[in-house]
Image (cartoon, rainbow, N blue to C red):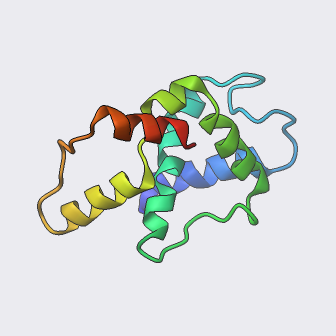
Amino acid sequence: MGGVCSLIISDFLSLVDDGTHSCWFVSGSNYGMADLHFYPVFERLPAIRMFGVDVFSADRFPRLGAWTSTMQQLDLVRKFWISPKMYYQFMVGRKAGDPPYDMETDDETMAVQNSVA
């Protein structure tokens, strides 16, 4: 990760895991736009682990792990959740120069993805 992106994520990690906030959400006692914008970054991390890179450890950032789990329970997040396997397939295709932007998913696949959070 470079420059600005690293700073934003670093600031976010500090905010969530500094121990001074009693709520799980960046915006306060309920989720907000900041939470919804940050969540997809963390949704992709399990796919990155499939490449053997662990950029996030719930042991190192327990509150962030709790925040991620809480976000995964939101209907809005569950509705648009993309499985680590699909992210991985996209990343492999992108690396090969042929990213599968239009991955086909049938209703059964989407139902499984939306039930496993």
Furthest residue to the bottom? 52
Residue visible at 27% across and 40% down?
Answer: 105
Say which residue appears at 57% left-offset and 24% top-offset: 75
Q: Nearer the viewer, residue 26 or 93?
A: 93
Q: Position of residue 99 (x, y in %)?
A: 17, 55
- Relative depth, front residue between 34 and 54: 54
Taking the image as shown, residue 92 lies to the left or right of residue 25, namely left
Asked whether the viewer can see residue 81, the reply is: no
How many numbered callouts? 0
Residue at image position (50%, 58%) is 45
In the rendered image, which quarter is residue 102 located in? top left
Q: Position of residue 52 (x, y in %)?
A: 47, 77
Which of the 4 quarters of the picture holds residue 26? Answer: top right
Left/right placement of residue 42 relative to residue 111 reads right
Q: Residue 20 in the image: state x and y as whole percent.
A: 87, 43
Extreme residue toward the left, this view: 98
Location of residue 35 by image quarter? top right
Image quadrant for the C terminus? top right
Image coords of residue 3 (percent x, y) = 44, 59
The residue drawn where x is 87% and y is 35% is 22
| Residue 97 vertical placement versus 24 (above, below) | below
Quadrant where the N terminus is found in the figure: bottom left
The one of 34 and 102 positioned closer to us in this rendering: 102
In the rendered image of this protein, does residue 102 appear above or below residue 58?
above
Whether residue 105 is visible, yes or no, is yes
